[in-house]
Image (cartoon, grey):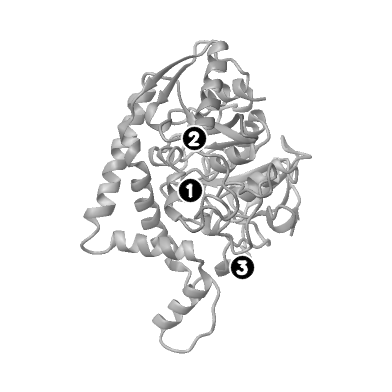
């Protein structure tokens, strides 16, 4: 295990099965994606010794494309966090400032790329978990349209929200990795044929002449001053290259964080029920009835943040409270999807700062989970609407990186890649 950044939970060398566009390229894989014969821990003591007997579809596609997988990267436990500090295996450090977090939950993947420990990486994005660490580490991350990339072999946290996506030093590199990953999979019924034949890498041509950009005002309010200044400098640069921008109001995004956490925690409480020390997870061999044995195994196997989300999700789904919380959250999600459709009917892409803040110092947010949840305000709306988004480095403030988020319509990856390549590469 690498210890300087703690980017990897498990070092490994998984050889390619064929020659292809990734021949000679090293790829790091987030530790919630199954790899045959190599442990997949999800950053949790619950799965510390779990070794999958099969590869995820994305891993099969990496190997067939000629990639060499160099290890499994550190992550917030079961993807629950914004800093990669809730991992059972300790926090990952940001390569740009080792006293700060790399973002989460794919912080190990972003740190591995930014620190030069892998050429490319796979992350997963449930509420911003690719884009946040990409922004904090000064690299590029893409959250694909829901259904563009197979989730077969991904250990589920919140099925209706999460996607596997690429992290790379450049827009063209991330787009090229997405070309390898995208496409239908008969083992994942949520995947689509649409987008499978696209050439995302070729779209990184930097041509934004005539592109229209909508800027949701609600995603600018509340951001740090230096982040806002860097964001507008990037928009001005795109304007100078021929793009046009206008401001747009999306009032539904103000409900997004609350709706997101109710839905994500509810799905997590259901998905993680299987980890009881008998079906999956560590078993303490406890005495007593099955209920007591399950409770002890889950108490020892899960960390505090996972327990918090399971309890809140179970409460939101419980009899008498389902309509009060879960149903309202789904209503808010429908409103938000409509707002995105309306905003994208008048713009090719939407733009905002990826994160309203610069990277936290290590330990800064752990005592205040609400602060950590609110930091996701600009990224979670994208997952609720199931549309694609990219985070691209836009500059720095006080020596720390700022990410620009570009959001497109469903299966509009080529457009966001093209716009992002005019900002960076």
In the picture of the structure, the residue carrying the numbered disc 2 is 224
Residues packed near mark 2 inside 10 Å, few (<14), some (14 to 19) or many (20 plus)? some
In the picture of the structure, the residue carrying the numbered disc 3 is 48
Query: Which element is circle 2 on?
Result: loop
Q: Which mark is residue 178?
A: none
Split into 4 quadrants, where in the image is the C terminus?
A: top right
**160 or 242, which lies in front?**
242
Measured Cα–Cα span from mark 1 to mark 3: 26 Å
> Most extreme residue toward the bottom, as rendered?
287
Residues packed near mark 1 inside 10 Å, few (<14), some (14 to 19) or many (20 plus)? some
Q: Is residue 351 above or below residue 300?
A: above
Measured Cα–Cα span from mark 1 to mark 2: 40 Å
Circles 1 and 3, Cβ within 8 Å, touching? The answer is no
Residue drawn at (50%, 68%), measured in percent from left and top? 302
Q: Residue 301: where, in percent of width, then height?
A: 53, 71
Residue drawn at (36%, 24%), measured in percent from left and top? 343
Query: Which element is circle 3 on?
Result: loop
Circles 2 and 3, Cβ within 8 Å, touching? The answer is no
Q: Which of marks 2 and 3 is in front?
A: 2
Measured Cα–Cα span from mark 2 to mark 3: 38 Å
Query: Which element is circle 1 on?
Result: loop
Residues packed near mark 3 inside 10 Å, few (<14), some (14 to 19) or many (20 plus)? some
Residue 22 shows up from this direction: yes
**Considering only order in the chain, which callout, 3 or 1, is on the residue closer to the N terminus?**
3
In the picture of the structure, the residue carrying the numbered disc 1 is 188
Q: Nearer the viewer, mark 1 or mark 3?
A: 3
Q: Residue 279: where, in percent of width, then height?
A: 49, 72
């Amino acid at each position: 295990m690498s210890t300087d950044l703690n980017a990897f939970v498990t070092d490994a060398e998984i050889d390619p099965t064929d020659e292809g566009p990734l021949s000679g390229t090293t790829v790091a894989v987030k530790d919630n994606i199954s790899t045959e014969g190599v442990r997949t821990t999800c950053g949790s003591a619950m799965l510390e010794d779990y070794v999958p007997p099969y590869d995820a579809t994305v891993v099969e596609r990496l190997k067939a494309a000629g990639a060499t997988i160099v290890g499994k990267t550190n992550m917030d436990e079961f993807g629950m966090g914004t800093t990669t500090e809730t991992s059972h295996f300790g926090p990952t450090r940001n390569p740009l400032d080792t006293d700060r977090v790399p973002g989460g939950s794919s912080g190990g993947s972003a740190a591995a790329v930014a620190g030069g420990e892998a050429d490319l990486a796979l992350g997963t994005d449930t509420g911003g978990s690719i884009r946040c660490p990409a922004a904090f580490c000064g690299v590029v991350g893409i959250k694909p349209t829901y259904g563009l990339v197979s989730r077969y072999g991904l250990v589920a946290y919140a099925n209706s929200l999460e996607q596997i996506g690429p992290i790379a030093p450049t827009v063209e590199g991330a787009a090229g990795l997405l070309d390898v990953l995208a496409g239908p999979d008969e083992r994942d019924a949520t995947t689509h044929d649409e987008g499978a034949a696209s050439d995302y890498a070729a779209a990184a041509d930097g041509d934004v002449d005539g592109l229209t950009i909508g800027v949701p005002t609600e995603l600018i309010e509340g951001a740090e001053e230096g982040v806002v200044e860097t964001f507008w400098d990037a928009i001005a640069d795109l304007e100078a290259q021929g793009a046009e921008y206008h401001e747009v109001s999306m009032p539904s995004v103000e409900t997004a964080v609350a709706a997101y956490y109710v839905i994500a925690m509810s799905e997590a409480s259901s998905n993680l029920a299987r980890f009881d020390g008998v079906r999956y997870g560590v078993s303490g061999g406890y005495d007593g009835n099955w209920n007591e044995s399950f409770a002890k195994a889950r108490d020892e196997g899960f960390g505090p943040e996972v327990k918090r989300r399971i309890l809140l999700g179970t409460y939101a789904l419980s009899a008498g409270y389902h309509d009060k919380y879960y149903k309202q959250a789904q209503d808010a999600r429908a409103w938000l999807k409509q707002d995105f459709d309306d905003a994208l009917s008048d713009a090719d892409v939407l733009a905002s700062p990826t994160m309203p803040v610069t990277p936290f110092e290590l330990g800064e947010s752990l005592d205040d989970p609400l602060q950590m949840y609110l930091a996701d305000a600009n990224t979670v709306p994208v997952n609720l609407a199931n549309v694609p988004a990219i985070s691209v480095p836009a500059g720095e403030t006080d020596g720390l990186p700022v990410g620009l988020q570009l959001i497109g319509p469903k299966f509009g990856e080529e457009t966001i890649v093209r716009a992002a390549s005019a900002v960076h590469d």
